[in-house]
Amino acid sequence: MGERTVTTLEGRGQAAPHPVTEEAEDRTGQGLWPRLRTPRRPRFWFEILLIAVSYWAYSLIRNAVPEQKAEALGNADLVWQLEHHLGIAVERSVNHAMNSVTWLIIGMNYYYATLHFVVTLGVLVWLYRRHPGRYAATRLTLFAATGVALLGYYFFPLAPPRLMSGGRFVDTVLVHHTWGSMASGDLKHMSNQYAAMPSMHIGWSLWCGLTVFALAKLPWVRILALLYPLGTLTVIVATANHFWLDAVGGTLCLAFGLAVARLWYGALPYALPRRVAGMATGPALAPAKP
């Protein structure tokens, strides 16, 4: 295309300082589907509203799923038997060993209650500020993974190990009088206690770990990113909130989320450009003087 001209108060026929109009014109000519798949610059107010509404809806739906206590306890027995068959049923040993170290298990209770919120939101903010071109696809991965987890809560109600009949697990929140779980103690009536499969503590921590590992530059940050889901796995088992297989369920949910983002954007989120096309990377150009 040739150089476009603009009309200003000072005069006519001056050259536009940069080809923004051509780029906008090219985007306008795209079809609806390509435009929907093209990453756009995230808007702060919209993202805050979307995250708040999405988490509210997720909590509402999760807690609205019938608790189905008898079925959930029966499924817990089945999972426990399957893990014995697979030779991985060591959750009780881990639970008792960690519970014997008071300061450690209290810290794990608070880790379980808080970090999946704090770290996940922190990674979203970091993506928004440093990787806006990858933000929408990475956020879609998280939302899709969380959405499909609701199907697990509905179709496979599962009691956590600490609620098993005769399981001899220690409910570390009750024993140490902490608020490490929305499904224990005085808070148990605010949350569905029988929604242990899949573990989205694992799904979200893996999302955080993979995202930071793939995009961060500092080696020590990347190492911490990998250690975070491993630490979360230890915590969910030590506090008797999940079986190992719940963690497998959370991992599968994240794989589903990545597949959705890959299909929608044509690439994994981490392979997309860091910045949105046409997004300024430096100081704005000053308008040409008459």
Image (tube, rainbow, N blue to C red):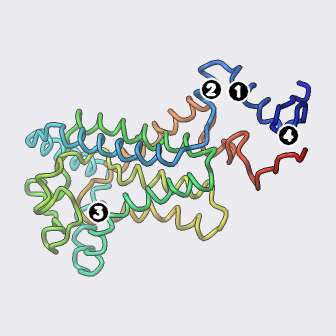
Mark 4–mark 3 CB contact (< 8 Å): no
| Number of residues whose C-alpha sits closer than 10 Å to that of mark 3, classed few (under 14), some (14–19) or many (20 or more) | some
4 vs 174, left or right, is right
Mark 3–mark 1 CB contact (< 8 Å): no
Q: Amino acid at mark 3?
A: Ala
Comparing 1 with 275, the one in front is 1
Query: Residue shown at 60%/32% (left/top)?
Result: 265
Report how far apart the C-alphas of labels 4 and 3 lie in the structure.
Answer: 62 Å
Q: Earlier in the sequence, mark 2 or mark 4?
A: 4
Q: Amino acid at mark 4?
A: Glu
Q: Earlier in the sequence, mark 1 or mark 2?
A: 1
194 vs 134, left or right, is left
Q: In the image, residue 73 lies at what x, y percent?
A: 12, 45
Vertical comparison of 149 with 274: above or below: above
Residue denoted by label 1: 27
Label 2, secondary structure: give it.
helix
Q: Earlier in the sequence, mark 3 or mark 2?
A: 2
Residue denoted by label 3: 113
Mark 1–mark 2 CB contact (< 8 Å): yes
Q: In the image, residue 84 lies at what x, y percent?
A: 25, 51
Comparing 83 with 262, the one in front is 262
Q: Earlier in the sequence, mark 3 or mark 1?
A: 1
Report how far apart the C-alphas of labels 3 and 2 lie in the structure.
Answer: 40 Å
Residue denoted by label 2: 35
Query: Residue shown at 61%/42% (left/top)?
Result: 41
Count of labels shown? 4
Q: Amino acid at mark 2?
A: Arg
Residue denoted by label 4: 10
| Number of residues whose C-alpha sits closer than 10 Å to that of mark 1, classed few (under 14), some (14–19) or many (20 or more) | few
- Residue depth check, mark 4 versus mark 1: number of the one nearer the observer: 4
Vertical comparison of 114 with 243: above or below: below
Label 3, secondary structure: give it.
helix
